Amino acid sequence: MAENHKKAAGRLCYLCNQRRAALKRPKTLEQFVIMFGLFVADSTVLAYVLSELNRRHNYGLDLFLLSVDEGITGYRDDSLETVKRNEIQYGLPLKIVSYKDLYGWTMDEIVKMIGLKNNCTFCGVFRRQALDRGAALLKVDKLVTGHNADDIAETVLLNILRGDIARLSRCTSITTGEDGPIPRCKPFKYTYEKEIVMYAYFKRLDYFSTECIYSPNAYRGFAREFIKDLERMRPRAILDIIKSGEDFRISTSTKMPEQGTCERCGYISSQKWCKACVLLEGLNKGLPKLGIGRSRGLDNNHWKDVKQSNGTKNIEGKQCGSLDF
Amino acid sequence: MQLTLEFGGGLELLCDSVKIHNVDVSPNNEVDKLTMKDLLVWVRANLIKERPEMFMKDDSVRPGVLVLVNDCDWELSGQLDTPLEEKDVVVFISTLHGG
């Protein structure tokens, strides 16, 4: 995060001319921007607002919609219909990448093999990579996502609960991966989910909303509910948690995982193989528990292993990572 | 009292996937006015067919469910004490799902 500050320090606020600019207008007019969505409210509002601003102020951005087809019958196929309607409504080209094409497995098949525990791990890890690969296919130079303030606060809490120092220090940055080929940006970092849903309601935006049929990850669900409870008692709590996350400073003596690349597919990874490759290898070899917690092959069923590894340093392990990066 | 209730953001799944309900709700006794508190009890008893815990928590809606009375956030009109009148429109939207 410190690096981000340095990078941004050059530009001062247009109004006070003293402090660093918090908002910046896109400078180059040829920037490609892309948005990813499960196309529930947040991503739909993001798509709407970006295309509207682009149109109204002639930013000259080339916008694309990117969506991931996890291959979940009865959940994804319905929501993809909504995305296709969005494609027409906003006049933006849509790209759908599927788990089946990228990995050879649909979530339906994965769940059939591993059951309903840990399935969110697969889905989360695969989605993150699917996004990057989809973005690379479209040759865009920025990826924007609809993560809102509630999501960020939730992620801060989860990273604390997991002791995931590496993610804790970067999960609050608005832009991540600036040294990589496709930086990701979260324009709604400070926007409450409530505001976004209200906006979508009053604008009568067409969005899809259903709980995933493979049940949302319970761990994240608790954090989510806790955040909503806090919000009811004191709405500012959400912004305060984000602030806490931003102000965390990791002691310099803490050993951080080194960011390298996966030997197998070349994706960023702090281990020899990236998480997706490990999980995929497990699936293809019929050892689906490989890569879930501390794996020891066939005999380990269920949570025992996950629990053990959660206490120790488990930098690359994340449950249901659809929201954090 | 005639009211229009609308369920969105996935809440419609709890009441047979019907989004808009035109209902007739009468106050508990003739003197009292109908409030949101009464309406929630009524909705839970009459419209919600499954998983009521997705809709309510204690005697209010579950945190994360937005409530609009005549397109106004109920937090501005007194939440559970919001009085209801003939032909009012009440909207419930859940925000509790993926990103």
Image (tube, helix red, strand yellow):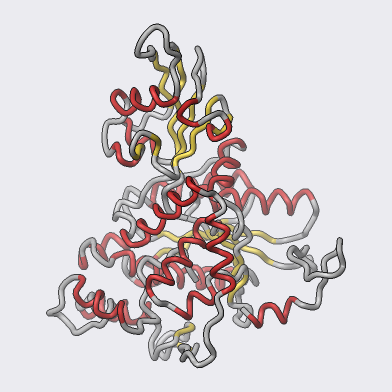
Q: Residue A224 appears in which quarter of the rendering?
A: bottom left
What residue is drawn where x is 46% and y is 91%?
A255
Q: How many marks?
A: 0
Question: Is residue B8 positioned above or below B46 on the image?
Answer: below
Q: Is residue B94 found left or right of A23 in the rendered image?
A: left
Q: Nearer the viewer, residue A185 or B81?
A: B81
Instruction: Return the x and y of residue B86 as percentages of the image width and height.
Output: 50, 12
What residue is drawn where x is 20% and y is 63%?
A115
Instruction: Return the x and y of residue A39 as percentages of the image width and height.
Output: 50, 51
Q: Is residue A20 found left or right of A283 in the rendered image?
A: right
Question: Is residue B33 positioned above or below A114 on the image?
Answer: above
Q: Is residue A35 found left or right of A269 in the rendered image?
A: right
The outermost residue toward the left is A299
Q: Nearer the viewer, residue B55 or A59?
A: B55
What residue is drawn where x is 44% and y is 40%?
B65
Instruction: Return the x and y of residue A277 as percentages of the image width and height.
Output: 36, 81
Q: Is residue B90 found left or right of A58 in the rendered image?
A: left
Instruction: Return the x and y of residue A191 as percentages of the image width and height.
Output: 60, 53
Q: Nearer the viewer, residue B28 or A270?
A: B28
Which image quadrant: the N terminus of chain A? Answer: bottom right
Question: Is residue B56 positioned above or below A101 on the image?
Answer: above
What residue is drawn where x is 42% and y is 29%?
B19
Q: Nearer the viewer, residue A160 or A10?
A: A160
